Every structure is written in structure tokens, then in C-alpha cells.
Amino acid sequence: MAWPDLVSYVFGGGFLANAIPHLVSGMMGRAFQSPFAKPPGRGLSSSTVNVLWGSGNIVIGYLLICRVGDFRLRSTGDALACGAGALLIAVFSARHFGRLHGGDRPAPR
């Protein structure tokens, strides 16, 4: 297990996890933040842009995981690297977009 492969799996997991909110929002017909919005990452992009961006994330994630090295889902190291990438982008997104949507505050009691 070479470390460049593991780095690729971390990024691949991040891209796959990032595809989820874009595809779901786009398929629901809802605008959502994307790098193509104005301002980038804060403004809203159309549902079509989000479906295309989410699909692009899946392609990049696939290439990084399935075409680099020999990814084995039953290999703990490979799976942990991919999962770590997904977790990192999920926590980053929750904190970043939570500030925009009020999700970073505790729920009222």
C-alpha cells in the first residue's frame, strides 16, 4: 500500500461525499451553493449546475479511487483513507455552510 495511493483515496472519498448534496439538491430542483455561484461557495447555483457539478465529482472520485493504485474495499487502510476524505469534506461543509444557514448554532431548548 503506497502512500500516494492513500492520498488519492482520501481525495476520492472527499469528491464522492461532495457529490451527494449537489446531486440531491439538483434532483430536487433546488438551488444550492457551488464554486460557480457568485460569490463562489456562498451564492446559489441552479439545480442544473448542481447536477452537473455533482456528476463531475462522482467521475473525479471514481478516477481517484478506482484508477489509482489497487483500491480494495476489504483493505482497512484503503477504506479508512476513503472514509477519512469523506468525513473531512463533510465536517468542513457542515461548518462552512452552517454559518450561512444557521446550522452551526445549538438547537434551542
Image (cartoon, helix red, strand yellow):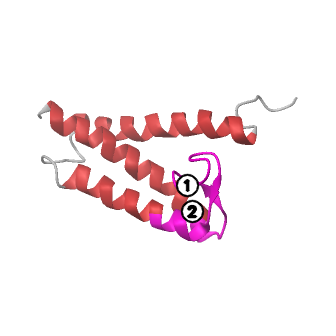
Mark number for residue 98? none
Rendering quarter of residue 78: top left
Residue 68: percent from the left, percent from the top? 16, 49
Residues at discs 2 and 1 in contact (Cβ within 8 Å): yes
* Mark-to-mark CA distance, 2 and 1: 5 Å
Residue 106: percent from the left, percent from the top? 77, 28
The residue at the point 67 percent across, 65 percent down is 30
Residue 93 in magenta stretch: no
- Three-letter amino acid code at disc 2? Val
Region rendered in magenta: 26-52
Residue 33 in magenta stretch: yes
Task: Compare residues 89 and 37 and report the one nearer the observer.
Answer: 37
Task: Compare residues 45 and 2 and report the one nearer the observer.
Answer: 45
Residue 56: percent from the left, percent from the top? 38, 61
Instruction: Judge from the rendering whether residue 68 lies leftward or rightward of residue 76; answer left or right.
Output: left
The residue at the point 24 percent across, 47 percent down is 73
Q: Secondary structure at mark 2?
A: helix
The residue at the point 51 percent across, 51 percent down is 35
For the N terminus, give its image quadrant: top left
Instruction: Judge from the rendering whether residue 63 lies leftward or rightward of residue 35; answer left or right.
Output: left
Q: Secondary structure at mark 1?
A: helix
- Three-letter amino acid code at disc 1? Pro
Instruction: Judge from the rendering whether residue 84 lies leftward or rightward of residue 100; answer left or right.
Output: left
Q: Which residue is mark 1?
A: 21
Q: Which residue is mark 2?
A: 24
Task: Compare residues 13 and 45 and report the one nearer the observer.
Answer: 45
Mark 1 crowd level (few <14, some 14–19, many ≥20, 10 Å Cα): some
Rendering quarter of residue 60: bottom left
Mark 2 crowd level (few <14, some 14–19, many ≥20, 10 Å Cα): some
Q: How many marks?
A: 2
Of all residues shown, which one is farthest toward the front? Answer: 38
